[in-house]
Structure formats: structure tokens, C-alpha cells
Image (cartoon, rainbow, N blue to C red):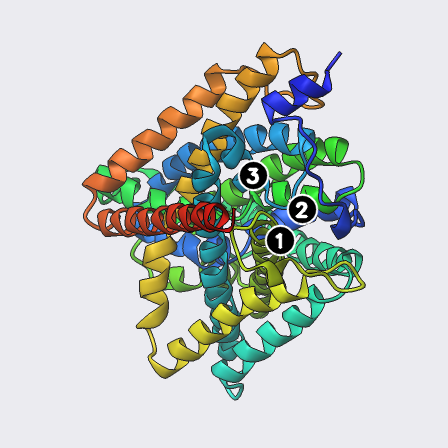
């Protein structure tokens, strides 16, 4: 039986559930939140960039990144089921590798999300403008941010239901897209010949060789970023141990089916050098003789981006709330409304997104590319911290005989496989000319955040000593 002493030593099963946040999210909402965060710009827009970089060989990039995210989600699921907390991997890293590492990971993920919030607002507004050109992009972007901020300021139960239907709509649309794409490839659409797999043969499969696959790998990794939000939302979910296990299993296979299936169809139908890859889903539907459906899928893409924005704003607010609770952020960000919502954390998270959106409007194509280049590989650092933390904390739990509600199979070998894949991605990234600046920028950001956390902690210790 697990003793209190053993629990305190392991850290993995030590309870830090933030009871003040409540537990109103339902398992189905948790699952859809994971989908809502991951199926957004990366699939509806970024997939075209991946195919342009690697051709149909981008599927290899998805295979590598998909394997990695499965292992990361299993590791996070084990830790979140044992210790549901809004700080999630930041808290786990703190326990496994020290408070400075934990704070660094938390701030790194928060910065990633607030930058992505701006990108998704502008991306959704830009897509909507292709259907309704009279709508100003800047106005729509700010309107989207304002509406979803209001949603995040309501009870988490209402937010969860909103996100559930948001995500369900785009999942239904992707299923419909897969059905149309399959009919096109099998030649079942009257009057339209099947393109077959001509783009998968010869030099067309990997037109830019290994370099193209490596470049696409970072596009794919960015697309999968955000899936880890499930571990954050576990703190506000009923029966977290059971809910997290179910969410991890369903989110992983659904994302892989939707991503790999969609990419396969797009790569088979649209050539790697086609201008249609700027809107890849619409290009496939146009090829299927369904121009009206292309407009519909563009609107669904807008919903997908807004759903991801909604989920990312939730995740960012909960992470900075957790940092504030641990003394790693201004204490005011840990305040709650009567509805058990961290309103100050929500507003702080959205403020950066609004500023970035305005700056991008004033200086088109200058602000967001720089910000996205800095945070583009931050998810790799977060995933690495999750795998390392699970390796350390699981060993402690096994050593002390702690009974965990959810255990990652194949430990420690599968965790090690995840770390090897991650190391290989970093190595490939440092060699590639396009990805190297992104990685180096992320490393610099990590160093600044770690130094800031260390100095803050040193100042706090000095203050305590002086007061004594």
C-alpha cells in the first residue's frame, strides 16, 4: 500500500489538484479539447507547406512525429492521471528536474501558446476574407479574440461545451473530406478520372530528398503541438484518472487517422509544386468537382482555427495561473472569480495575442514570422521535459512501491525510444539551414527563461534571509 511518506518522496502520485478551479469538465469535453487544440492551422494550412517541402514523402515526417507524440501522450497520461494539476508538465518537471526547470518549461509553453493565439486569429480572419472579401481582416481578428476571451471568462463547464461542439464540427468535416477524397482516388465520382498514385512514383515521392523531409518534419511537429493540453485540463475534469486515460487513447489515434489520412489524399491529388497547396483541402474538393464544398471547407477551417485558439487560450491561462500559484509569476494571476475562473490569467494571456495581432496588422508579414520562428520548436522542448520527467518520476514510484492509476507500457524502453527520436529531430534540425535558426532561437529563449527563474529564486531567498 502507498504510504504518505512514499507519496511525498516520489512526487508522481503526490496530489496537487487545484480544488479551487473545480472539476466541471466532462470526459468527452476533455477528449475534444485535445483534438481542438491540435487540429487547427497545422492541418488546414500547414499541411500544404509540408507537402511543398517534401512532396508525398511528408508522410514519413508524419510517421516520425506521430510516433513521438504517441509516446509523449502516454507519458503525460501516466503523470496526469496520478497527479492532475493545471501546471501539468511544468509541475512534473519541477519535481523531477528542479523548480528552475519546471518554471522554464511552464513559461516556454505559455509563450508558445500566446504567440499561436495571434497566428490563429489572423489565420482565421484571413481565410474568412477569401470567402467574404469585404470583411476587414484586422477587425475580424480582433473580434474573434474578443469573443473567445469572453467564452474563456465563463464557467469552465460552459467553455468545455463550447469547445466540444466547435471540435465536433471540424471532426465531422474532416471525416467528410476523407470520404470525398477516397471516392476521388478510387474513381467513384462520375466523370472525374482518379489521379491514382502517380505523385508517389519515381522522383515525385521525395522531390527534395532527405533535406525536404527534414524541413517538413518541423512543420509537422508544429502541427501536433498543443495536444499536450489534455494534461493541463485534467485538473478540472471529473474522475481525472479514468478521463485522462480515455482521452489520451482516443486523441492519439484520431489525430493520426485525421492527419495521415488527410495528408495522403492531398499528396495524391495535388502536385507538390501546385499553387493549390496554399489551401490544400479546397484544392482536393475542387479536383473532385465540388467547388461549393471548397468554400464550405474554408469555413470549416475558420472554425478549426477558432477552436484551436479557444483551447490554447484556456491552456495558456491555466499554465500561468499555476505558475502564479507556485510563486513563479505575479500572485495576482492566481486570483479566481466566483465562477472559479482565473480571469486575470485569461486576460494576461490574451493581451499578448492582441498586441501581436495589432503589430502584425501594422507591419504585415514582419511580426508573426519572427515570433513563430522563436516558438516553432518550443513544443520539442516541452515534449522532452515530459519524457525526462516521466522517466525520473516513474522510477521513483516503482522504487517506493507507489500504485499508479495509469501506467505507461514498455517502461523504460518506450520512454527511451521517445527520447532517441527527439534527439534525432534536434540533430536533423541543427543540420538543416531552415530549421537551425529556429532551434537556436528556442535554445536562447530557454536560457533567458532559466536565468530569469534562477535570479528570481535567488532574490527571494535573499529577501527571506534579510527579513530573518
Q: Quadrant of residue 160?
A: bottom right
Q: Earlier in the sequence, mark 1 or mark 3?
A: 3
Element under disc 2:
helix
Question: Residue beneath label 2, please?
Answer: 233
Q: Is residue 136 visible?
A: yes
Check whether the beta carbons of the residues at disc 1 and disc 2 lie within 8 A of each other.
yes
Residue at 48%, 39% in the rendered image: 99
Give the position of the N terminus as an image quadrant. top right
Element under disc 1:
helix
State the image coordinates of residue 309 (x, y, percent, origin top left).
Answer: 57, 62
Q: Closer to the observer: label 1 or label 2? A: 1
Q: Quadrant of residue 83?
A: top right
State the image coordinates of residue 397 (x, y, percent, origin top left).
Answer: 60, 17
Q: Residues within 10 Å of mark 3 (few under 14, many from 20)?
A: many
Check whether the beta carbons of the residues at disc 1 and disc 3 lie within 8 A of each other.
no
Depth order, front residue of 21/242: 21
Question: Residue beneath label 3, please?
Answer: 91
Q: Closer to the observer: label 1 or label 3? A: 3
State the image coordinates of residue 206 (x, y, percent, origin top left).
Answer: 27, 40
Residue at 37%, 47% in the rendered image: 377
Question: Residue beneath label 1, please?
Answer: 318
Q: Is residue 268 visible?
A: no
Residue at 36%, 25% in the rendered image: 420
Amino acid at each position: 500500500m502507498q504510504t504518505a511518506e512514499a507519496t511525498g518522496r516520489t512526487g508522481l502520485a503526490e496530489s496537487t489538484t487545484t480544488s479551487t478551479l473545480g472539476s466541471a469538465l466532462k470526459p468527452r469535453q476533455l477528449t475534444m479539447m485535445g483534438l481542438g487544440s491540435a487540429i487547427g492551422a497545422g492541418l488546414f494550412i500547414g499541411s500544404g507547406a509540408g507537402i511543398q517541402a517534401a512532396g508525398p514523402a511528408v508522410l514519413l515526417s508524419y510517421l516520425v512525429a506521430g510516433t513521438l507524440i504517441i509516446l509523449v501522450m502516454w507519458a503525460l497520461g501516466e503523470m496526469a492521471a496520478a497527479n492532475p494539476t493545471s501546471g501539468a508538465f511544468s509541475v512534473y518537471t519541477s519535481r523531477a528536474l528542479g523548480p528552475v526547470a519546471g518554471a522554464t518549461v511552464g513559461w516556454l509553453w505559455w509563450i508558445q501558446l500566446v504567440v499561436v493565439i495571434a497566428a490563429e486569429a489572423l489565420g482565421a480572419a484571413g481565410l474568412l476574407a477569401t470567402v467574404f472579401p469585404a470583411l476587414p481582416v484586422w477587425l475580424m481578428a480582433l473580434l474573434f479574440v474578443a469573443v473567445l476571451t469572453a467564452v474563456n471568462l465563463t464557467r469552465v463547464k460552459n467553455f468545455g461545451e463550447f469547445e466540444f461542439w466547435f471540435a465536433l464540427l471540424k471532426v465531422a468535416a474532416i471525416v467528410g473530406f476523407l470520404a470525398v477524397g477516397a471516392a476521388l482516388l478510387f474513381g467513384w465520382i462520375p466523370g472525374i478520372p482518379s489521379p491514382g498514385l502517380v505523385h508517389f512514383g519515381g522522383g515525385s515521392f521525395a522531390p527534395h530528398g532527405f533535406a525536404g523531409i527534414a524541413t517538413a518534419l518541423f512543420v509537422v511537429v508544429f502541427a501536433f503541438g498543443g495536444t499536450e493540453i489534455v494534461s493541463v485540463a485534467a485538473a478540472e475534469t471529473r474522475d481525472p484518472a479514468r478521463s485522462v486515460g480515455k482521452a489520451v487513447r482516443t486523441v492519439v489515434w484520431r489525430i493520426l487517422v485525421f492527419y495521415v489520412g488527410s495528408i495522403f489524399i492531398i499528396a495524391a491529388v495535388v502536385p507538390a509544386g501546385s499553387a493549390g497547396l496554399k489551401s490544400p483541402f479546397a484544392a482536393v474538393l475542387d479536383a473532385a468537382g465540388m467547388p461549393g464544398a471548397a468554400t464550405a471547407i474554408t469555413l470549416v477551417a475558420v472554425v478549426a482555427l477558432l477552436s484551436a485558439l479557444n483551447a490554447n487560450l484556456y491552456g495558456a491561462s491555466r499554465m500561468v495561473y499555476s505558475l502564479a500559484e507556485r510563486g513563479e509569476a505575479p500572485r495576482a494571476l492566481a486570483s479566481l472569480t466566483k465562477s472559479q475562473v482565473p480571469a486575470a490569467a485569461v486576460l494576461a494571456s490574451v493581451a499578448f495575442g492582441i498586441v501581436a495581432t495589432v503589430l502584425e496588422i501594422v507591419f504585415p508579414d514582419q511580426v508573426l514570422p519572427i515570433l513563430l520562428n522563436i516558438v516553432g520548436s518550443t513544443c520539442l522542448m516541452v515534449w522532452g521535459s515530459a519524457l525526462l520527467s516521466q522517466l525520473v518520476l516513474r522510477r521513483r514510484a516503482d522504487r517506493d512501491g507507489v500504485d499508479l492509476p495509469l501506467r505507461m507500457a514498455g517502461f523504460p524502453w518506450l520512454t527511451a525510444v521517445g527520447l532517441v527520436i527527439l534527439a534525432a529531430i534536434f540533430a536533423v534540425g541543427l543540420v538543416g539551414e531552415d530549421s537551425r535558426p529556429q532551434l537556436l532561437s528556442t535554445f536562447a529563449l530557454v536560457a533567458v527563461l532559466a536565468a530569469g527563474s534562477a535570479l528570481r529564486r535567488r532574490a527571494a531567498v535573499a529577501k527571506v534571509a534579510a527579513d530573518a
